[in-house]
Every structure is written in structure tokens, then in C-alpha cells.
């Protein structure tokens, strides 16, 4: 299903000459990281680039977390830890899941990894066999596609409609399910659309999973960034779904800790055990003192995360109101995460006929970095991150508006 995605980095001809494995032909560079790198290059060359491409909070990691990690280093916590994480961190995760998510789990159901990305990889590698079907909702985070395909899975995509705030219709989900469905990947709040699934849709999906026997991998990394709605964890919905869900979360987005690389999964015991054994042979434990920082993050005063959430909500309102003034740009106000996904198809014609060409044009001529929607299965759109200062948001959108107001190049 990779039609809309960038081609793999390595061709079969290169494989023969470079002696790479056939598997290596599947590896694709991350377009988001590529655009961020290009924006940084232009910046280093002295250009005044505004980046609305990055997927990370622009806040510093809160001081109490930093202090906890420093104390861990000073206290000698610099050795290997158990692969699935220190008992302290796993207990803090158990407490957090009970307190914030209504998920009752034991410490042996928790596996801490090097970022939520590794937790997702562990989940898919543990659950999916070649030929199994993995259902995703478009617009989706591209990593889900690549990881499912690494595991030999076949990806099936359910389209969603911006007019329904990118929440899928039940009938469309039902049409994508089959006896070969092994996993449905949920990402609410969503990167890139900001969709937040309502309780009714989640309840339906949970019932269906239990009836048909498929698994839900629920990526809840943006759970703390929800505006005007409540986050619901599918694993908390009862009726047996806890035994068929892997809940993935981490510290990157909610606590401004992207570089610390702490993610975690909560899964039924046999799945958690298999994930831990896989991780034994890949990375072993996540960094010891980063785990100590994560303990502090999970027990931090919720006022701190609420302060960040409110700041993101203000920025969301700002970027949406500015974009709404550009003629022809259509936008749904997102309910979560820190991205907007406006539709720019009205501007696609002539030499700039795809969202990728538009993103390149905006970077090169307006010096604004965005990510083309086709990366996420949303052609015609651009993803913009509002994890940027108010000044950068104003400057970036003004430059885009100006570039688009000129006759098509
Ligand atoms: C939807 C989603 N899940 C997971 C991750 C990965 O998080 P981490 O940095 O903890 O690996 C990201 C990061 O961009 C994301 O957008």
C-alpha cells in the first residue's frame, strides 16, 4: 500500500552491488526528519527559516525531571537495568495507568523502551505474522506502515473525513476488518490530524476486537494534549478488551522529553514477556538515568503538564485563526496533539501540483518548513506543528499567505 509514500531508499540494483539484505530495500528515510534536516541546513547557512515541521515540544524538560536524572547519575545509576525497566519506573507506570487511564495492570505487564517508537515496534513484531492484516486510520503516522511491513503484515487503510474531525465511520472500519485482521492501530489524539476518537467509536471497536479476536495497539503518546474533550483509553473499556490491547505511551510529548527516549507498553503478560525478550536482543534497557527522570515525570504535579497543554491550546487557536484567513485553505480545528493538517489542494496546479512540491516551494522561497500530507496518507494537505513560539507561528503563516498570494510560479 505504499503508493503515496516516498520510495525506499535503496533499489534492488543497489542491493546487489552493496550486498545489502533484501529487507534493507524496505527501509525508508523519515520524510519529517529529512525536511527538518533541510530546514536546519538552510538555517546553518544563515537563512531565517521558520520550522513548523518538528514533532517535538519547544519547551525545556521541567527542572524536577532534570534534577532527578542528575541525582541518579551522581548516585551511580549508570549501569544496566532489567530490560523491561527499573522496578521503580514500572511501578510508577502501573500507578499512572490506574490513576489517569483506568487501566489496572501488574508490574510484569510493563515494558519500558527507548521511546514509544520502540514500544510500537516491539508490539508489532510480537503480534504480527507474515500475511496478517494491520488496520490503520488515514491520516496515519508513517512509522505504523513501515513497522507493520517489516513484520510482514499487510496494511489496510481506513479513510477518514475532515468533516468528521478525522474520526472514522463505523461502517468504514467494519469494511476493513476480516478474519485475517490481527491488529488495529489506534492513535488518539492523532499525529498528524489531531483527531480524538469519541467513546462510542472506541466502545464499538473494543466489542468488535473481542468478538473477532484481533488486537488493538493503542498509541496514546499525545494523551495529555486534548482540547475540549476527554481522552479515553480503549483498554479501560471493560468486556475483555484489556486482554487484547497493548497500550503504548511515553514521556516524549507530555513532558517535553523527546531526547530522553523513554516509552513504554502495557500488555497482557505473555505479550509483555515476548516484547521484553525481543528487546533483550536489540537494545536491552532504556538509559538508566533517563528512567529515573521518567519516574519524576510520572509523579510530577499535574499543574505543570496542564500549563503546557493550555499553552498548546492557545497556539492551536492562533494558527487556526491565521490559516482561516488564507483564501482556499480548508481546515478542521484539531482536538488534540500539536499539529494542524490544512487542505491546500486549491493551490496545487501547474508546476506545483503535489503537496510535496508545495512543501519544497514553501521551504525554498518562503523559508517555512512544513511536512507534505502525502507522507501521512493525506495528499493535498500540509502538516504544520504548532509546537513553535507564537512569533514563529505568526511569521510562518504570514510568509505562506504571501507566497501563495503571488501568481503560480
Ligand atoms: C503518533 C506518535 N507515536 C509515537 C511517537 C514516538 O515517540 P517517541 O519519541 O517516544 O519514540 C511519535 C513521535 O513523533 C508520534 O508522533
Image: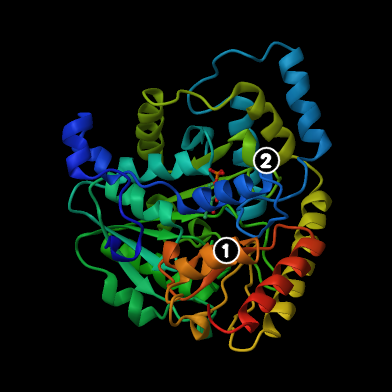
| Residue 233 percent coordinates (x, y) | 54, 59
Between 370 and 318, which is closer to the camera in this rendering? 370
> Is residue 17 found left or right of 304 in the rendered image?
left
Under circle 2, the secondary element is loop
Kindly give the residue lying farthest to the bottom in the view shown.
327
| Residue 34 percent coordinates (x, y) | 50, 49
Residue 313 is at least partly visible in this image: no
Locate residue 251: give its quadrant: top right
Is tag 2's residue or tag 1's residue first in the polypeptide sequence?
1
Q: Judge the density around disc 1: few (<14), some (14-19), many (≥20) Cα neighbours within 10 Å.
A: many
| Residue 322 percent coordinates (x, y) | 73, 78
Foreground tag (2 vs 1)? 2
| Protein image colouring | rainbow
Q: Residue at x 55, y 40 (%)?
A: 263
Q: Residue at x 31, y 75 (%)?
A: 174
Q: Residue at x 59, y 12 (%)?
A: 79
Residue on which the image places disc 2: 257
Between 397 and 119, which is closer to the camera in this rendering? 397
Cα gap from disc 2 to disc 1, whole angstroms: 18 Å
Q: How many marks?
A: 2
Residue 390 is at least partly visible in this image: yes
Ligand 1: does it lie within 8 Å of the C-beta at label 2?
no
Residue on which the image places disc 1: 189
Under circle 1, the secondary element is loop
Between 205 and 137, which is closer to the camera in this rendering? 137
Q: Judge the density around disc 2: few (<14), some (14-19), many (≥20) Cα neighbours within 10 Å.
A: many
- Position of 6 relative to 125 (above/below): below
**Residue 402 bears which disc, if any?**
none
Amino acid at each position: 500500500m505504499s503508493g503515496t509514500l516516498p520510495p525506499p531508499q535503496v533499489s534492488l540494483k543497489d542491493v546487489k552491488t552493496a550486498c545489502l539484505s533484501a529487507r534493507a530495500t524496505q527501509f525508508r528515510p523519515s520524510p519529517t526528519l529529512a525536511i527538518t534536516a533541510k530546514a536546519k541546513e538552510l538555517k546553518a547557512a544563515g537563512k531565517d527559516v521558520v520550522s513548523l515541521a518538528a514533532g517535538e515540544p519547544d519547551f525545556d524538560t521541567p527542572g524536577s525531571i532534570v534534577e532527578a536524572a542528575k541525582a541518579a547519575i551522581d548516585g551511580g545509576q549508570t549501569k544496566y537495568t532489567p530490560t523491561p525497566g527499573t522496578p521503580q519506573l514500572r511501578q510508577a507506570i502501573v500507578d499512572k495507568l490506574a490513576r489517569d487511564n483506568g487501566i489496572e495492570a501488574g508490574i510484569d505487564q510493563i515494558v519500558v523502551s527507548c521511546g514509544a517508537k520502540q514500544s510500537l515496534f516491539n508490539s508489532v513484531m510480537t503480534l504480527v505474522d507474515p500475511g496478517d492484516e494491520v488496520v490503520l486510520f488515514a491520516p496515519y503516522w508513517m512509522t505504523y506502515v513501515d513497522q507493520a511491513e517489516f513484520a510482514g503484515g499487510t496494511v489496510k487503510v481506513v479513510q477518514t473525513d475532515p468533516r468528521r474531525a478525522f474520526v472514522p465511520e463505523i461502517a468504514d472500519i467494519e469494511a476493513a476488518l476480516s478474519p485475517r485482521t490481527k491488529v488495529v492501530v489506534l492513535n488518539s489524539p492523532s499525529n498528524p490530524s489531531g483527531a480524538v476518537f469519541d467513546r462510542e467509536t472506541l466502545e464499538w471497536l473494543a466489542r468488535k476486537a473481542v468478538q473477532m479476536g484481533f488486537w488493538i495497539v493503542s498509541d496514546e503518546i499525545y494523551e495529555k494534549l486534548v482540547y475540549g474533550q476527554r481522552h479515553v483509553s480503549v483498554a479501560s473499556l471493560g468486556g475483555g478488551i484489556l486482554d487484547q490491547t497493548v497500550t503504548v505511551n511515553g514521556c516524549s510529548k507530555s513532558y517535553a522529553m523527546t531526547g530522553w527516549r523513554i516509552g513504554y507498553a502495557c500488555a497482557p503478560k505473555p505479550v509483555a514477556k515476548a516484547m521484553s525478550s525481543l528487546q533483550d536482543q536489540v537494545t536491552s534497557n532504556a538509559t538508566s538515568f533517563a528512567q529515573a527522570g521518567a519516574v519524576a515525570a510520572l509523579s510530577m504535579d499535574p499543574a505543570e503538564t496542564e500549563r503546557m497543554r493550555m499553552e498548546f491550546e492557545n497556539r492551536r487557536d492562533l494558527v487556526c485563526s491565521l490559516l482561516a484567513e488564507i483564501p482556499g485553505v480548508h481546515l478542521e480545528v484539531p482536538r488534540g496533539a500539536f499539529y494542524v493538517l490544512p487542505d491546500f489542494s486549491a493551490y496545487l496546479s501547474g508546476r506545483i501540483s503535489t503537496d510535496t512540491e508545495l512543501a519544497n516551494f514553501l521551504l525554498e522561497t518562503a523559508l517555512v518548513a512544513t511536512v507534505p500530507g502525502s507522507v501521512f496518507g493525506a495528499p493535498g494537505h500540509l502538516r504544520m506543528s504548532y509546537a513553535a513560539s507564537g512569533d514563529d507561528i505568526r511569521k510562518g503563516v504570514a510568509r505562506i499567505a504571501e507566497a501563495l498570494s503571488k501568481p503560480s510560479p
